[in-house]
Amino acid sequence: MIRSSVTFYILIFSSCLFFNFTVKSVDKVRFFNAFSSTNATVVKKELEHLKNLSFVEKEAYTGALMMKMAGLEGGVTEKLKNFTEGKKKLENGITKDKNNIEYRFLRIVIQENCPIFLNYSSNVEEDARFIKNNFNSLESELKKFVLDYKPKSENLKKAGL
């Protein structure tokens, strides 16, 4: 009887541990704080954190941070490799979920700020309109990040946000 009770409690405890460590989505405030940072250590730490988690949005968020890191450190070859790999991940995320406003916001920020020779700017007007048209459906803390970025974005201003 005692043995079955102990086994039962071990199973319950193990289940609680498993479910507490299974992440269903990204901590968006933490992510966007890292994404808006110019400190390579902060961005790298969040990128490593994301790589160790499992959730649906992981690919797009990881890709965006990889592109951000490409602008902060590394040699030319490493920067280009990270940017290209990150771009592929972000674009795959957008392809899978075309109506995700956050992914579109990540892309517009990157496209407006990456060097022109990377030839990654073809979606800025489309994304700006999409963000403007869907802005009210964002969570309040994400609205704050968009509004904080807006003064730096000619495209969001042109779209009327």
Image (cartoon, rainbow, N blue to C red):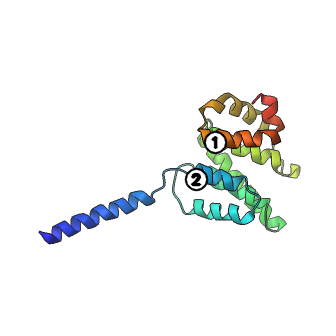
State which quarter of the image contains the C terminus.
top right
Of badges 1 and 2, nearer the viewer stands 1
Q: Tell me which label, 1 or 2, sits earlier in the chain.
A: 2
The residue at 78%/29% (across/down) is: 159
In this rendering, does residue 56 appear at all?
yes
Residue 95 location, x and y as percent?
63, 42
Q: Which mark is residue 159?
A: none
Secondary structure state at the residue bearing disc 1: helix
What amino acid is found at the position of numbered circle 2 in the picture?
Answer: Lys
The residue at 59%/62% (across/down) is: 49
What amino acid is found at the position of numbered circle 1 in the picture?
Answer: Leu
Left or right: where 55 falls relative to 108: left
In the depicted structure, whether residue 98 falls above or below residue 70:
above
In the depicted structure, whether residue 15 falls above or below residue 154:
below
Cβ atoms under marks 1 and 2 closer than 8 Å: no
Q: Which residue is mark 2?
A: 58
The residue at 77%/28% (across/down) is: 160
Residue 129 location, x and y as percent?
73, 30
Secondary structure state at the residue bearing disc 2: helix
Left or right: where 125 falls relative to 138: right
Q: Which residue is mark 1?
A: 142
Residue 14 location, x and y as percent?
33, 64
Crowd rating for badge 2 (residues with CA inside 10 Å; few <14, some 14–19, many 20+): some
Q: Residue furthest left?
A: 1
Residue 148 location, x and y as percent?
74, 42
State which quarter of the image contains the N terminus.
bottom left
In this rendering, does residue 85 appear at all?
no
Q: Residue furthest bottom?
A: 3
Instruction: Depth check: give the residue in front, 117 or 67.
Output: 67
Crowd rating for badge 1 (residues with CA inside 10 Å; few <14, some 14–19, many 20+): some
**Residue 8: quarter of image:** bottom left
Q: How many marks?
A: 2
